[in-house]
Image: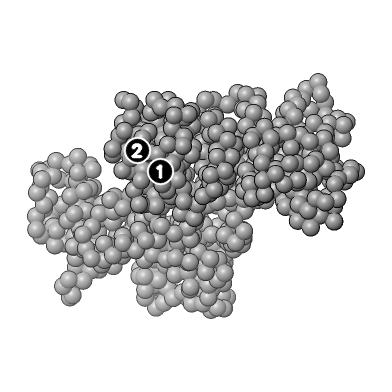
Amino acid sequence: MKRELILLAGTKETERALKEQLQSVFGELIDITSYACDEGIPMYFTNKLIIYSSALIAPEVKEYIDFGSCTIIKARRTVNYEYIDRIFELPPGKKILYVNDFIETAQEAVSTLKRLGIDHVDYIPYSPTGDYPRQIDIAISPGETASIPPSVPNKIDIGVRLIDLNTIMKIIYHFQLSEQLTFDITDRYTRKIIELSQKLGAINRRAKTLNKFLNKVVDGVNDGILAFQEDGEITVFNEVLERMVGITANHAKGKKLNRVFKNIELNHFLTSQHDEDQQYFTLRQQNVMVYRFRLKAEGVIVATFKDMEETIEMEKVRKRELQRIGYIAKYTFDSILGKSAIINETKMIAKKLAQSELPVLIYGETGTGKELFSSAMHNDSSRKNSPYLAVNCSALPEDLLESELFGYEDGAFTGAKKGGKKGLFEQADGGTLFLDEIGDISLKLQARLLRVLQEMEIRRIGGNKNIPVDVRIIAATNRDLQSLIIEGTFREDLYHRLKVLSLQLPSLRDRSEDIPLLIENFLRMEHSKITTIDGAVLDALKKAPWSGNIRELKNTLLYMITVAEQNWLTIHQLPKNDYNFIEKEHTKGTFSLPSISMSKTGEYVNILTALVEFFEEGKRASRQKIYSSLQRTSTPLSVQQIRTRLNELKDLGYVMIQRGRVGTEITPEGVTWLNNNEEKVLTIR
């Protein structure tokens, strides 16, 4: 069921700040739509959960709400902790003007500050319609500095007041979110809370005052939180940590670490000089992971204590869910077999590239393991716990590929899924998207992909809003993209966007010494009965050109172990019709051209026949024209298939593929072959 929330605020600035806060808390769990009264409410709401930024806006929005079907939550607001240091820096006992657009809002905000213990100054609530003591020289305002009287010289913006935890819990209760999701949401608060500890300074008053505020917040999270100063004095010690270690916060706060924690190893870890570290400990028969980091400028060390059993179970659930929907990378760098210098160097470079957030373009012949490297790089990156999705760009028609990548809205086209669909970019948000065979996408999709790389936002098919995404792109190709740029079939600007980092994968010919290791692994994976391989077989396998690389080697081996009658492989099991093992008549050690299957022969004959006809008519032979011509034959091919067959014919020496107006031409060798084979194929025109 789709969860939706409508946020209504008085001003645009308040609306923007509160929406950003709610999105940071709930992520994709809840769709949040927001409006500001200043800009007008564009619709009438029914059957919605509506959050008021303040009770004061109720009269302004009541005509837009069906109160019989809508649920209304009036948000309680609290101080914006990101700017709390600006308040603590105010001189104690100073009279401070607290300015807001309404006097009621200003009074409520002052009451909240005092309740949280931030009461070292004398606040005077003020709105533009009121009066104030003229001797005041400092004013603070939550995003309403324009309302501060011009005569006040010092104006301080303490940020729009945020929605408090009590209101957040009401939203969680309304949507009946699971306990696990509730934990995830409170975890997101943890980092914010830890950031508050950065405000702890050398002055005792400031540290203790801030602790009063922190204590009211940190007790509501799911992890134990500890903060202490460089001299070991404990300043933050929440209720969860009390339960974990069996020590009360009242006993711990203000004391030195070594007087509170009797575990010598834990004390040594907490006071280590390393800036950041994590380690397992057993505290009162409970396994916990302690993560510690140092805030150098503030002279504060922060540690979080997480229940490992709960964490492991959460991680298992998360990984099972990712695996269920196929969003997990299967391979690591350990999955890439080989001991040759070139493969070790390639892996070393790939590991370095994995640490970056920049796009990577992988070059490699077919069968060299481009997806293997992409998957390994994801698993070695900071995004390893986030989704990994892969798509073969040459395997899908243009329109289908576009909808897969970018998604679509409800009713975007005939057959569109009701409610629309997220594209791969949205599904991979926070993770990695692998685009294989990138050289085969159309110019239209290239333009859309370029925009994603530039703006990091997408728009669904049929949609009218941009959706921000955080995705790392790894692309791969076995084609020469620079040649495609010259031909005008690949955008140069996209090429440079993708090729910020690049990785060249070696062919199997360049690492033939790895073949025995690869063979052993294939046999083990297939649970093969083969125990012995003749030296002549290994020699033949090492000398083969392997245009299909590792994939072709594996297929050859599968053939051999299938036809083998004993538990060893001999030269007699090598495929008889495989060009990898057919020596030329007069040149030992080299290999003949591949034999051509009957189905391919028919396709070749029809393509070459079309080329002859175009030549005789003085026409340019483009792939599109060949495509149109073949639609009338018994072997119609797609443009992509024609491109593949033309490249094969070029390798055989039967055609020349030229740029510009000349197009593709048949060679004399191609004419000879066509004359010899035309009668073998029945072609229906």
Q: Can I make out residue 185 in this image? A: no
Residue at screen point 81% across, 23% down: 67
Marks 1 and 2 in Cβ contact (< 8 Å): yes
Q: Residue at x 35, y 58 (%)?
A: 351
Quarter assignment of residue 510? bottom left
User: Which residue is identified by label 1?
Assistant: 232
Q: Is residue 561 left or right of residue 94?
A: left
State left or right for residue 400 relative to residue 387.
Answer: right
What is the x, y in percent for residue 280? Answer: 32, 37
| Amino acid at the residue labelled 2 | Asn
Q: Secondary structure at mark 2?
A: helix
Q: Residues within 10 Å of mark 2 (few under 14, many from 20)?
A: some
190 left or right, relative to 80? left
Q: Earlier in the sequence, mark 1 or mark 2?
A: 1
The outermost residue toward the right is 129
Front one among 513 and 247: 247
Residue at x 42% of width, y 48% of height: 230
Local secondary structure at mark 1: loop
Please provide percent x and percent y for residue 62.
Answer: 86, 30
Q: Give the residue pinned by disc 2.
A: 258
Identify the residue shown where x is 79% and y is 58%: 153
Image coordinates for residue 155, horizontal then vertical, percent? 76, 54
Q: Rounded to the nearest whole Å, what is the CA distance between mark 1 and mark 2?
A: 8 Å
Identify the amino acid type marked 1.
Answer: Gly
Q: In screen coordinates, is 104 left or right of 344?
A: right
Residue extending furthest toward the top: 68
Q: Is residue 194 above or below residue 64?
A: below
